[in-house]
Image: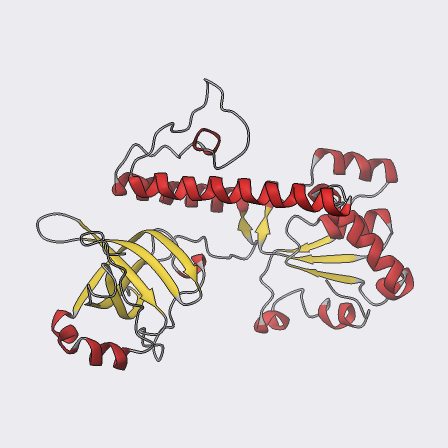
Amino acid sequence: MDAEHGLARPAIPSSFEALLEAEPQVLESKRVFQGEVLSRRVKSKHLTFCTLQVQSDEQDEHVALCFAAALVDESQVPSPTRRNDLPVGLQIEVEVVRAPRFRPEFLVRRWRRAPDGGSPVVETGAHGVSMARCLALKDQVNRRAKALLGGDGLALCKRWSGCAAGSCSEACEFRHYFQSAEEETKARHARCARERSQRLQAQEQEEYGEGPHEKVDKARRAARFAAWLVKTYGREVLSSGRGVLDVAGGQGDLSWQLSVEYGIPCTLIDPMVRRGGELKSWQRRALRKRGREQAFEHLPVTFEAGLTSQTRVPRVLPFAAAGGAKE
C-alpha cells in the first residue's frame, strides 16, 4: 500500500529482467552497502525483510532491505529463506537497486557475508557448544541491535494489547502503549484472529460434541514416543548393535526414556552441551537408585557428512545403523 496516495503497489516482478522492462532506469540507482544486520523478518521462502546498519563518514545509517527471491541472483548466494540465514549481528555486503513503484525498501540483487564480518553464532568445538554461552551471546547481540534501532527496548505486553487472552497485572514489566500505528494495526489483527479461532473452536465442539484435543504435554512426549518405538520395533531390535542413534536429540529426553526406562542402549548426537554436560538433579537421583553411573552416551558433535572420520564416532555409526531403528 502506498502510504502517500493510499494506492496499492503492483506485485514485485517475477524476474529481474521483468523489473528492467517495467523500470528501465532501475540500474541507475544501483548501490553497494556493507553493514550489520539489526533485524530481519522472514515472510515466506520468497520474501524477507532486513534492517541494515551502514557505517558512513558522518554517521551510521539504517537501511531497509527487501530480499525478493525472484530478483536475487542465486548464482552466488541464494535469497535467505530462514531466520538463521540472516542472524542479528551478521556483517553482510549487498548490491541493491531502488524501485519505489514496487517496494519502498531497497531491492537486493546480490548479497554475501562480509569478508571481515563474523557470524555471532558460537562455533562448534572439540567438546561441543555450551548452551549457556550460546544463549548469552545471542542475548548480548540482540540487546545491542535493539539499542541501535532506538526505542525504549521494552516488548509490547500481549495481554494488554489483546494479542493473548487474560488480563495484565499492575506489576507487568512490558510496554502498555503502541509505538506506531503499524504496531497497533498488527495487534488488532492478531486479536481478531485469536477471537475468530476461539469462535470456530466453540462451534466445532458444539456441533461435534468433542472436547479439547488430547495431545500430550511436551514433558511427556518423549515417554510416549519411546513407548511407541518399543511397541513397534521391540526391545530386541532396538538393542541390537550399539542400540539407538538419537540424532539432534536436544537434551536427551528420548535417550533417557529408552536407556533408563527400557534398558535400551542409546547414543545421543547433539552439539549443544547443557548444564556443563551434567544431568538434571532428579535424573542423577534416579540413576543412583538404579545403581547406574551413566544413562546414555553423548557425543557433542554435529551430524554431517564428515562425521565418520572423527574420533570415537566410527565405532558408533556402523553398529547403531544395524539396529534397524534410528531417531
Q: 261 or 88: nearer the eye?
A: 88
Task: Report the colour scheme.
Answer: secondary structure
Q: Which residue lies furthest to the left in this view?
A: 58
Quadrant of the drawing holding the N terminus: bottom left
Residue pictured at 33% horizontal, 65% vertical: 67
Q: Which residue lies furthest to the front in this view?
A: 207
Q: 146 or 43: nearer the eye?
A: 43
Q: 211 or 232: nearer the eye?
A: 211
What is the count of numbered marks? 0
x, y percent for residue 82: 45, 61
Q: In this view, does 3 lie to the left or right of 230?
A: left
Residue pictured at 45% horizontal, 28% vertical: 160
x, y percent for residue 279: 69, 41
Q: Is residue 213 left or right of residue 114?
A: right
Above or below for 50 versus 79:
above
Residue pictured at 81% horizontal, 51% vertical: 259
Q: In this view, does 43 lie to the left or right of 238?
A: left
Q: Can residue 294 be seen in this view?
A: no
Quadrant of the drawing holding the C terminus: bottom right
The quadrant in which residue 81 appears is bottom left
Residue pictured at 25% horizontal, 38% vertical: 150
Above or below for 290 versus 317:
above
Q: Can residue 287 be seen in this view?
A: yes
Q: Is residue 152 left or right of residue 122?
A: left
x, y percent for residue 180: 29, 38
x, y percent for residue 242: 80, 64
Above or below for 84 versus 112:
above
The quadrant in which residue 110 appears is bottom left
The quadrant in which residue 274 appears is top right
